[in-house]
Amino acid sequence: MKKQVMVVCGYGPGISNAVARKFGKEGFELALIARTQAHLEHAVAEFEEQGIVAHAFPGDLSDPAATRSLLDRIGTTVSPITVYFYNAIALVGADVLEASVSELQDCFSVGITSFLAGLKPCVRQMHGQDNAAVLITGGAFALDTDQINDYAVESNVIGLAAVKAAQHKLARTLSNRLQPEGIFVGEVMVMDNVVGTPFDDGQATLTADMVAEGFWQQFIDRDPVTLMMAAPA
């Protein structure tokens, strides 16, 4: 069977870990991207204990040029990328009117510019692969309702809300652009707080594993482009 590689941009202990583990158990080789070498090496060792092949690629996803170069390198040193999974975010740690210019730039560089910079080498590597896909972790902040907008203000995450709204639009438009080339674009929009994440208020019931199962089913079905996932009733 031909090797299939999933690159995980913004690897961490929550949703990205669960998605990587799910796809790894289904036979994908993993290329993990995060800032810290030691953190990645620990993750690689844990995946190898589970029989999953993984590789560590430390990188700064706030640097679009470096991101593009890194994804090119993964394609040549591991294998052409089959699935481009983007889970990276940068939280602006203050009210958006009080945040520094560099904080705001990082927020959009990580969430939008580097995503797009990395997309081009990934799409080039995906051509000719039957299961090629671009997967994005979306969120309820992308929606325009008074309740969600009030929560974004109260939580000091207006920058994140703007990024998630932009990612949602990108998922929809990129789907139209890449579908004729045989590349599926899917977004799982996380509609509730996830257990163990910074937004968990102690009452969250939606788990990262549930989100991972949603991504996998979406990937298998090649539908829908946007899958909304909420905690079970």
Image: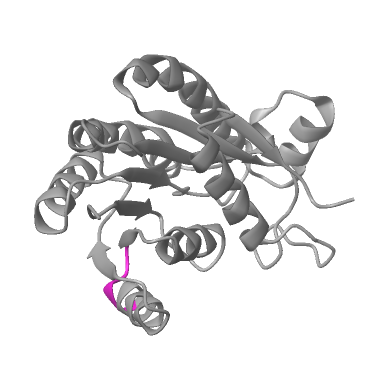
Q: Quadrant of the N terminus?
A: bottom left
Residue in the picture at 32% in, 63% down? 35
Q: Which residue sits at x=21%, y=32%?
A: 128
Q: Which residue shows up at 23% across the image and 30% down it?
A: 120
The quarter of the displayed image where residue 138 is located: top right
Residue 34 visible to the viewer: no
Depth order, front residue of 174/213: 213
Query: Left of 120 or right of it: where is 35?
Result: right
Percent across and percent down for residue 163 are 52, 33
In this image, 116 relative to 139: left or right? left
Is 151 drawn above or below residue 167 in the view shown?
below
Looking at the image, the residue that sits furthest to the front is 1
Quadrant of residue 213 in the image?
Answer: bottom right
Specify whether residue 35 is painted magenta: yes
Q: Among all residues in the image, which is located at the extreme right?
A: 233
Q: What stretch is highlighted in magenta?
A: 34-38
Residue 107 rendering spot, x and y as whole percentages: 45, 41
Q: Does the magenta stretch include residue 222?
A: no
Q: Is residue 53 visible?
A: yes
Left or right of 58, for residue 24? right
Where 102 sits versus 40, above or below? above
Picture coordinates of residue 14 (x, y %)?
A: 56, 64
**Quarter location, residue 187:** top right
How is the model colour-coded?
one colour
Q: Is residue 230 above or below residue 54?
A: above
Outermost residue, left direction?
A: 76
- Counting from the top left corner in percent of width and height, residue 191 is at 73, 42
